[in-house]
Image (spheres, helix red, strand yellow):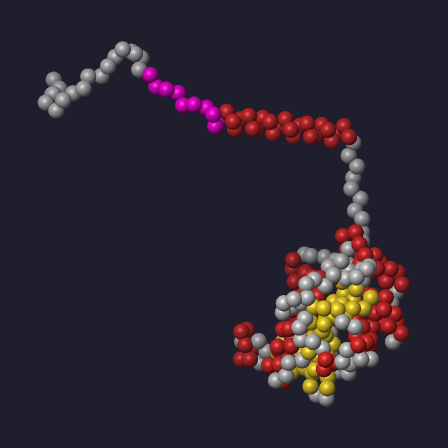
Amino acid sequence: MELVRYDDRDYLRWSEGFAFRRRQERQRSGKKRIEPAALSVISAAAEFGVRSILSRHFHLGERRILRYQDPEHGDQLRGRSRFRELDAVAFSGEKATAVFEFKLSGLGSASAVSKAAKQLRSAAEMIRQGYGQTPKVAVVLIHAGEGHPDLGKPGGRYGVRRISIEKVRLDHLPDQPIPCFIFSMKEAIDEARRIGHEVDHELERRAAREGKHGLSRAKRLTLPSIPIGELFAAVSWMARGLVQAVGTVARKVTRRRAVHRHPHPHYRRRRRGRGHHRR
């Protein structure tokens, strides 16, 4: 395992192959490419902005791509490498001292930071195996909603707690609960514009609406209107069919089996003993 730069030749080749396989899979399945939500489109610019803010407080390096081999899939035998992108890595000399995971979220903040915490623990363990040192970890939440985000319960291995970036040193970051730095989407986008990234203002407004109301309310669906007379007729027809079906089932269940009677009610069959022989 090793950390490589974002422009590593093997990583770029792997990324192109991954994108090509995704396109082929979409063509085979006949799925059409869905237009991404505004939050997804604007997230790249927001990450550039947050990375710039973090660089004022920590020494971020260019090597933030994990290259590793998975022995369970025989990568070591085939000499095959896998890659995993980290959002930001702080260094002290050549040592990776902290790993940051970004999450842009509006309504589902608690689930987003919980997922980020699990990814961070996994990445820190991989770096420990490669370099013999476990780096600090921290979640960075880019909050696109309103009010205070819900971070869930701070307890447990994957619990997080909000911490101010202005009052913390890298070597003083707590191991548990995982520290969480929170920036508003406006802060991130303003910083991205300051360092030279162009962000469309209409796209920013759409993303703000999606963060406030959720993606399900970003585009309203218009349902066809049904006349009230046709609606009542349909309900009546369905109710009549249901009553008939219930009656049919009830008759089948409660129907008694007919008792078999002999045509001569006073006839009694004579018992035959062992010594009786037919003539």
Q: Quadrant of residue 227?
A: top right
Image height check: is 189 above or below 37?
below
| Viewer-side residue, 194 vs 143 | 143
Q: What main secondary structure does the magenta stretch of the protein show?
A: loop
**Residue located 56% across and 28% down the image:** 246
**Residue located 66% across and 78% down the image:** 66
The answer to if 66 sits in the magenta stretch is no
Query: Where in the figure is residue 53, as x and y percent of width and height?
Result: 82, 75
**Residue located 69% across and 71% down the image:** 178
Image height check: is 2 above or below 224?
below
Determine if residue 102 is in view.
no
| Viewer-side residue, 99 vs 81 | 99
Query: Where in the figure is residue 76, as x and y percent of width and height?
Result: 55, 80
Residue range (magenta): 252-261
Query: Where in the figure is residue 139, as x and y percent of width and height?
Result: 72, 71
Query: Where in the figure is residue 28, as x and y percent of width and height?
Result: 65, 60
Q: Quadrant of residue 87?
A: bottom right
| Viewer-side residue, 252 vs 35 | 252
**Residue located 54% across and 76% down the image:** 71
113 displayed left or right of 186: left
217 displayed left or right of 28: right
Quadrant of image for the C terminus:
top left
Determine if residue 150 is in view.
yes
Residue that sits furthest to the bottom in the current view: 93
